[in-house]
Amino acid sequence: MIKINENFQKLQASYLFSDIAKRVAAYEQANPQKKIIKLGIGDVTRALPDACVKAFHAAVDEMAADASFRGYGPEQGYGFLREAIAKNDFQARGANIDADEVFVSDGAKCDTGNFQELFSTDIRVAVPDPVYPVYVDTNVMAGRTDTWSDGRYQGLVYLESTKENGFVPDLPQESVDLIYLCFPNNPTGATATREQLRQWVDYARENKALILFDAAYEAFIQDPDLPRSIFEIEGAREVAVEFRSFSKNAGFTGTRCAYTVVPKDCMAYTSSGEAVAVHALWNRRHTTKFNSVSYPVQRAAEAVFSEQGREQIKALVAYYMDNARYIREHMSKLGYSCIGGENSPYIWIEGGMGSWEFFDLLLNEAGVVCTPGAGFGKCGEGYIRISAFNSAEKVKDAMARIEQALR
Ligand code: MLT
């Protein structure tokens, strides 16, 4: 008899964004004449930068001739892309990362979800609350939690991010082994200072813990004093892994390209206390289960670092950040307390009512889709998240509709 992994039965309903899509589909079916504006899931809407498109086309042409055709590439990604990443995203900012510590992949979602496979099922895992649901659900699937009770999985340590702590969680009172952090944060848009990250790095070093640092929204940081990578913090090479993506800065959500940085100094331990390099473990896992990203996509990603690519990406980010500013200003003017939207494409808004109630109100009265904060965890209750990823016209239209609906 084929038996299931019963941990899957502990999972709550469906994935948050599937839940929202179902509600939106039901609304659209009941109101076919109404045009809705989607500011929910953080999916980009603007075309790929021209520099990426040109590189993409040229690489497809290479694949069309026997002499330049390429079959399987290196599982970790082509050297040209790994080198461009190490040089531009890290070494240029004083972070000591080598090309062979970069693993190219098809998404930060997959990598943040898969990384936990390297570790024992009896470790203590700390996740932020509110949280990107992938961190939690993949640990549930792996059997690291008990049952769901009172809005939380028993067995996880929740790091509360609230108005009181400026949405940057305090260090846990107890010892934990695996820590998920995300800055600029999804969903709150909060950022962490160098000093705050330093405290986490120190904690991890003292506790022989590992930080999984999700920096998928790094490109949206405007404040030059904020760290863009955890590897700008001394000692982080020993205790942190960083996830980055081309999805949000360069519009690759449908093209798929991301990368994970695993420094060779990073260690995890056997039950007898022997140190094992996390790099070697991830390399083993990656080469067994993954055949990397297609050659044309890696060439398109490489073009992000060209002179034109850089300019075009700057313009893309600026476009979405104008939307973010508009949303933040508008919602503040309507009397809502907002955070985020200054160094991130997400605005986190206190609604003065239940999250799903506010979600339904905006959907039914304004035809605007947001994301209910409660879907990201208990501390998200009472909040909604609005995403800046849409056209400026639609964002303005959405804000006008919300103003009218809430008047
Ligand atoms: C979000 O809306 O939180 C993101 O789109 C999720 C993701 O990038 O997977």
Image (spheres, grey):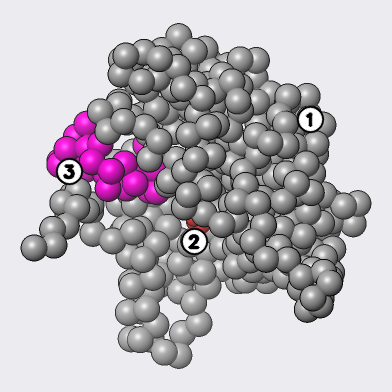
Q: Is residue 174 above or below residue 387?
A: above
Residue depicted at x 47% and y 52%: 289
Residue depicted at x 23% and y 41%: 143
Q: Position of residue 383 (x, y in %)?
A: 39, 47
Q: Which residue was labeled with disc 3?
A: 148
Please say whether residue 146 is one of the residues in the magenta stretch.
yes
Left-right relation of 103 to 298: left
Q: Based on the displayed image, in which of its 4 quarters is residue 155 positioned?
A: top left
Residue depicted at x 19% and y 34%: 154
Please say whether residue 112 is one of the residues in the magenta stretch.
no
Q: Which residue was labeled with disc 2?
A: 41
Label 2 near ligand 1 (CB < 8 Å): yes
Residues shaded magenta: 129-157
Q: Which residue was labeled with disc 1?
A: 91
Task: Looking at this view, name the residue that lies furthest to the front.
Answer: 67
Q: Is residue 386 above or below residue 276?
A: below
Task: Looking at this view, name the residue that lies furthest to the left.
Answer: 1
Circle nearer the N terminus (2, 3): 2
Q: Based on the displayed image, in which of its 4 quarters is residue 60 positioned?
A: bottom right
Q: Position of residue 293 (x, y in %)?
A: 62, 59
